[in-house]
Image (cartoon, grey):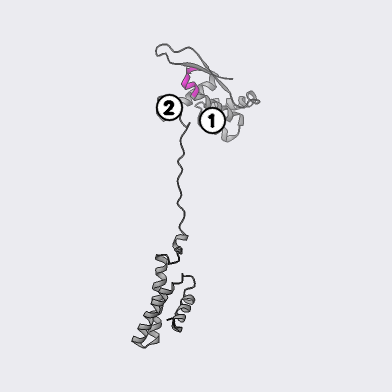
Amino acid sequence: HESPFHHQITSFICVLLPGVLVPTKEEIRLITISCVIHYHYYHNKLIMRVLAVLLLLVSAASAFVTPSAYGAVRPSTLMEPAATTTQLDMRHRKGFKKLGKPADQRKALLRALTTEVIRHGRIKTTLVRARAVRKHVDHMIELGKRGDLHARRQAMGWIYDKQLVHSLFDAAPDRYAEQEGGYTRVLRTVARQGDNAKMAIIELV
């Protein structure tokens, strides 16, 4: 039967551990029986109270390990972050022509072709190289139209002839003032004798 000591233990649990899940009636009954046994065995209220506190702490700690009979969620699971899934981006349309050369030689070739197109205004090369160098020539003309110091230093880092950079920055703002893009054109021509490679002419507009 439920004695006044049973209600005292229940109120003691609620006061001592307000943030912990309250045990069920069966757990409280077992704790009460254990305390009563120790009380009659030792005849000492102080020892009984110490044992009761220890039993309460053990039962409170077990509430964090396993869910209670009412299906409560453990507090530790509330702070766990949700699992995130990584999204893999496909590299569609990211390829470019390697021109049959490693990176350093390819960069040197494109810089040389850019320099010659700006110097002469018109050169003849293979179709693949003409299409590859076209964007670099347009970019240099865009830098020349911009005309600031940073743009001039960027152009000097790509064009081999430094004096040609100054000439480009002097002529580009007037020549292409009313034009936005499309500063070069690529014209296909007859194939090269010997290896029958496709040839083209790239020139400034």
Residue at the image point whose x is 39% and y is 69% from the top: 62
Category of crowding for the residue at label 2, using alpha-carbon neighbours closer than 10 angstroms: few (below 14), some (14–19), many (at least 20): some
Q: Quadrant of residue 54?
A: bottom left
| Residue under numbered circle 1 | 155
Residue at the limit of the structure toward the front, as seen here: 1
Residue at the limit of the structure toward the left, as seen here: 41
| Residue under numbered circle 2 | 98
Residue at the image point whose x is 35% and y is 83% from the top: 38
Q: For the residue labelled by badge 2, is the local secondary structure a helix, a strand or a loop?
A: loop
Taking 178 as reference, is 139 left or right?
Answer: left
* 77 w.r.t. 158: above or below: below
Residue at the limit of the structure toward the bottom, as seen here: 43
| Quarter the N terminus occupies | bottom left
Residue at the image point whose x is 42% and y is 30% from the top: 103
| Residue 187 percent across, percent down from the top left | 53, 16
Taken as a whole, is the magenta stretch helix, strand or loop? helix
